[in-house]
Amino acid sequence: MSKKLRFNKRHLTPYLFLFPALLALGITVFWPALQAFYLSFTRYEYDLTQTPQWIGLANFERLWIELGAPASVFRKTMVNTLLYLVFVVPLLVVLPLCLALLVNQKLRGINWFRASFYTPVVISMVVAGIAWKWLYAENGLFNQFLAQLGFKDGIPWLTSPQLAIFSVMAVTIWKGLGYYMVIYLAGLQSIPSELYEAAAMDGSDGYLKHWDITVPLMRPYLILVAVISAISATKVFEEIYIMTQGGPRNSSKTIVYYLYEQAFSELEISYACTIGLVLFLVILALSLLNLKLSQGRISDAIAKS
C-alpha cells in the first residue's frame, strides 16, 4: 500500500507544478476560446447586457453570402489576406535565406551585421509603424528623396487604394527579415564544411554549391519558415491599425482587422466570433501542414549531416 501511495505521489508532483500555469491558461485562453465558439452560434450584438440568442448556423450563412458578394467588405478582406500570402510569404522565405548566407561568412565585424539585421525584430511594431508612416507621409523622407530625383508630386504610399496594402507589406517584410534569418542561420551552421569542400572538388563551387548542397539540406527550415510566415500573414493587424486603419476604401483591410472592427466598432460580437472561428480553422490547417511536412525532417537532416 505504501509503495502504491509513493508511486501516486511521484506521478502527481509534475501536475502540481503545471497546475498554476494550466489555471492561468484556462482562465485567459481556453475558457474565452470556448465562449467565442459558443457565441459564434448565437446572436449577441449591440446591447451586450442581453442574453445571447441561439441561432445555429445563421452567422456562418451570412459569412458565406458575404464571401460570394463581389462588393462585400468581408470578401475584400479575404482578397487582401490572400495578397499578403502571395506576396509576403515567398519574399520572407527567400530574402532571409540570402541574408543568412551573407552573415554566415567568417568575416571581420560580421557579428555587427547580424545584430543590425536583427534589430527590427526587437523594435515594437507600434514604433515601427509610426516611423514608417512618417517615412510614407506626403512630405516624408521617401517623397523628399523622389523630389530630388525629379518626381515633384511624390507617391501616395498610404492614401492610394492600389498602393496602400503593398506599402504595409513592405513594413511586414522589413520587420520579419531578421527573425527568419536567425532560423536559417541555425540551419546553415549545422551543415558540415566538408560537404562544401567535397562539392568544390566535383566542380560545384560558387553559387552552384548552395543550389546543390545548401537548398536540399535546408529544406526542413524552408518549410518551417514558409508555414510560420503564412500563419503570421493571416494574422497581420498592428501595422494595418497604425498605418492605414484599413483604408483607403478598405483597400488594406485584412481579416483580423475586419474581425476587430466588427467586435469593437460595430459591436457584432457573435459575428466577430464566427470570423475568428474561421480564422482559427485556417491557422490550424496551416499548423497541421507544418507538422506534417516538417515532422522528423530536421532531425534527419542533422543526422545525415
Image: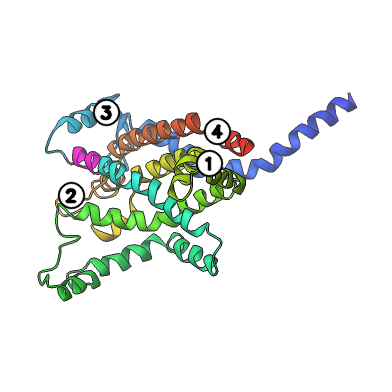
Mark toward the viewer: 4 or 3: 4
Task: Please tell me whether residue 240 is drawn above or below residue 70 in the rendered image.
Answer: below
Q: Which residue is mark 2?
A: 251
Range drawn in magenta: 73-80
Tell me how far mark 2 sits from mark 3, CA to CA.
Answer: 24 Å
Mark toward the viewer: 2 or 4: 4
Whichever of labels 4 and 3 marks the residue nearer the N terminus, that label is 3
Dot 3: within a 10 Å radius of its alpha carbon, few (fewer than 14), some, or many (20 or more) residues? some
Task: Please tell me whether residue 81 is drawn above or below residue 41 in the rendered image.
Answer: below
**Quadrant housing residue 125:** bottom left
Look at the image and tell me whether residue 165 can be seen. Answer: yes
Q: Main secondary structure of the magenta part?
A: helix
Task: Please name the amino acid that badge 2 sits on.
Answer: Ser
Dot 4: within a 10 Å radius of its alpha carbon, few (fewer than 14), some, or many (20 or more) residues? some
Tell me how far mark 4 sits from mark 3, CA to CA.
Answer: 38 Å
For numbered disc 2, what is the local secondary structure?
Answer: loop
Q: Which residue is mark 4?
A: 297
Mark toward the viewer: 3 or 1: 1
Q: Quadrant of the C terminus?
A: top right
Mark toward the viewer: 1 or 4: 1
Dot 2: within a 10 Å radius of its alpha carbon, few (fewer than 14), some, or many (20 or more) residues? many
**Quadrant housing residue 65:** top left
Q: Which residue is mark 3?
A: 60
Q: Quadrant of the N terminus?
A: top right
Residue 18 as seen in the image, left or right of residue 5: left
